[in-house]
Structure formats: C-alpha cells, structure tokens
C-alpha cells in the first residue's frame, strides 16, 4: 500500500534536489566567514571596476572643460576630496550591501540544507520501519 506521507516527502526531496541543491551545496562548502569575505571581495573588485569606468566616462564627458581649466584646478584637492571620497563611499556601500546579502544567503542556505537533511532522516525512518 502506498504511504501518502512518504510520497509527499519524496516529492519534496526530489524538487529540492532539482531546484536548489547545487546552489546551496556550493555555499555549504564554505565556512560562514570565508563565504562572506569572498563575496565582499568580489563586490569590492566589481565596484572598483565600475568606479574606474564611471571616472573615465566623467573625464571624457568633461574633457573640454577640464582642458580649459587645467591650470586653475587644484589636482591634489580634486583627487583627494572628490575622487577618493566618492570611491570610498561607493566601495564602502557596495561592500556593506554585499556583506548583508551574503550573510543572509548563507543563513538561508544553511536553513534550507538543514530542512533537507531532516526530511532525508524522516525518509530513512520510513524505510527502517518497513524493514522491521
């Protein structure tokens, strides 16, 4: 006779394996701190590249104005106050957002895998009961 609870449990496990297993097993292979630092470092590199692209676009867009005022602009002040502060704000906000997002993803992956393993234990218990 077919046990409905067992069929439901097997369906849940199969859909989880098809949908989320690879994504969460990849996250599960890291320690929490290692995973978060890796994601934050990726975010910092991406933010740096994006900032450099935006800075080059700004220079190209204001090229004529910069050439006309090149001797009146204090380059040290321009780079220290405007460019570096903008860079620090952009990278800092991206890193903070990445930290929060990766910590949330890691927690969700652990919770999902814990639920998956509990369901596997339930399924194993079904088979143990049938053998006895």
Image (tube, rainbow, N blue to C red):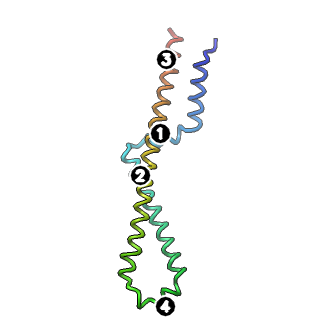
Numbered label attached to residue 109 = 1
Nearer to us of marks 2 and 1 is: 2
Give the alpha-carbon distance from disc 4 to disc 2, as whole Å. Answer: 43 Å
Give the alpha-carbon distance from disc 2 to disc 1, as whole Å. Answer: 15 Å
Q: Quadrant of the N terminus?
A: top right
Nearer to us of marks 4 and 1 is: 4
- Which residue is disc 2 drawn over? 99
The spot of residue 98 in percent (x, y) is 44, 53
Question: Label 1 near label 4: C-beta < 8 Å?
Answer: no
Nearer the N terminus, badge 3 or badge 4? 4
Q: Residue at x 44, y 48 (%)?
A: 102
Q: Quadrant of residue 110?
A: top left
Relative height, residue 81 to residue 106 (above, below): below
- Which residue is disc 4 drawn over? 68
Nearer the N terminus, badge 4 or badge 1? 4
Give the alpha-carbon distance from disc 4 to disc 1, as whole Å. Answer: 55 Å
């Amino acid at each position: 006779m077919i046990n409905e609870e067992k069929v439901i449990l097997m369906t849940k496990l199969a859909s989880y394996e098809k949908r989320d297993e690879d994504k969460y097993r990849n996250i599960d292979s890291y320690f929490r701190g290692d995973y978060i630092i890796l994601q934050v470092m990726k975010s910092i590199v991406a933010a740096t590249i994006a900032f450099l692209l935006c800075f080059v676009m700004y220079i190209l867009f204001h090229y004529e104005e910069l050439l006309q005022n090149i001797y009146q602009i204090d380059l040290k002040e321009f780079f220290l106050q405007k460019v570096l502060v903008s860079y620090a704000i952009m990278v800092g906000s991206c890193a903070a957002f990445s930290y929060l997002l990766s910590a949330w993803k890691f927690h969700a992956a652990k919770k999902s895998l814990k639920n998956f393993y509990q369901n596997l234990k339930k399924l194993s218990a079904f088979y143990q009961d049938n053998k006895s």
